[in-house]
Amino acid sequence: MDTFIASIIVFGLLIFIHELGHFLAAKLAGIKVHEFSLGFGPKLMSFSRGETSYNLRVFPLGGFVRMAGMDPAEENCAVDERGFNKKTVSQRIGVIFAGPLMNFILAVVLLAVIFMVYGVPDMPTTRVQDTLPGRPAAAAGIMPGDVIVEIDGKRIATWDDLSKTVAASAGRKLNITVERGGERLTFQVVPFRNEKGIWMIGIQPAPKKVDLLTALVSGTKYTALLSYQILEYLGKGIARQVPLELGGPVRIVATINEAVRSTSWFVNLISLSAFLSISLGLFNLFPIPALDGSRILFLVLEKIRGKPVEPQRENFIHMIGFGLLLLIIVIITYNDILQLIM
């Protein structure tokens, strides 16, 4: 698949699902929706249905749902009973939270597709199905068929135990004990960090195809696990326990390019989309001005204080936050381009 087409599909899917969450929650709460847009800038395509205009805009990195009662300067903002500002705090939090929530749901569904088509890792066992050539496990001497029983003297009973222990290693050397042919062997392995920022040693469990319900349950479990690993990595990065590397659109496109050019491009692209969807959901929940998390924080403050923050002041804070986010994106993009050309 062409990298450009794959990038448009991945970015478009993540943005569409996120904004769809806001849109559906707004409709459910009885809020008037003026506009549902994918992208920013001038319109490429537009059509109207009922009271809502649906638009595709030039710049694809984002989208928005424009609801009645969100802009204090809007005509009839104070009197429109179907306005966002007229709903209860709980309803408004629900509308804002629905966007990130849909990103987590998308990740669950995408992972479930992988588990039904290709299989889910056989979690009750730590038997190695395969080792990735050139990766630390293979280089150290671990072989397919080995059963990992201990890491640094700690008993490893499930693949979940194994993944969490390796992910928490922060790249330090691990003493991994395996059972092979009735004897125990110990290997020293230094984990590597993959493109998602997760520490791994380059082994694969035996996959097992599952039904829809089991796939959805496993997808939910893996979504929660990936969310935990991302937050743990960010926490350690902020505490300077590990190097914190953040990637922007350029690095994402580069990673998509690697995925589509691999022999297992379909499963790699779906897996990457699930990871990006989780990342987008988590990022939007951070209490940073202009993000969903900040809007939820303002609503929680309103609930505590019994009155809202002055709309003009809140909008000004979000505007400043949006400008800072754009600046950060520009800096990250510049660094990504330097790394690609060097």
Image: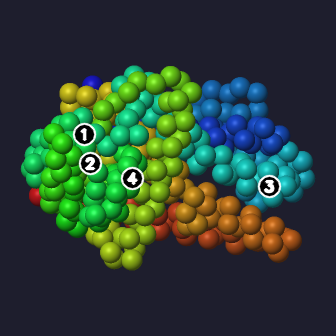
- Mark before the other along the chain sequence, 1 or 4: 1
Determine crowd level at label 3: few under 14, some 14-19, many 20+ residues with C-alpha closer than 10 A: few
181 or 99: nearer the viewer:
181
Which label sits on residue 128?
1
Q: Distance between the residues labelled 2 and 4?
A: 11 Å
Determine crowd level at label 2: few under 14, some 14-19, many 20+ residues with C-alpha closer than 10 A: many
Q: Distance between the residues labelled 1 and 4?
A: 14 Å
Front disc: 1 or 2 = 2
- Mark before the other along the chain sequence, 4 or 3: 3
Q: How far apart are marks 3 and 2 (CA)?
A: 48 Å
256 over 94 or under it: above or below: above
Q: Position of residue 144 (x, y in %)?
A: 18, 37
Position of 93 compared to 60: left or right?
A: right
Residue that lies at the very extreme toward the front in this rendered image: 182
Name the amino acid type tagged 2: Ile
Query: Residue under circle 2?
Result: 148
Query: Residue under circle 4?
Result: 161
Q: Position of residue 276 (x, y in %)?
A: 42, 46
- Asked if the residues shown at circle 1 and circle 4 are in contact, with their CB atoms under 8 angstroms apart, the answer is no
* Identity of the residue drawn at 67% across and 33% down: 53
Q: Where is residue 6 in the image (x, y as percent from the top left)?
A: 34, 31
Front disc: 2 or 4 = 2
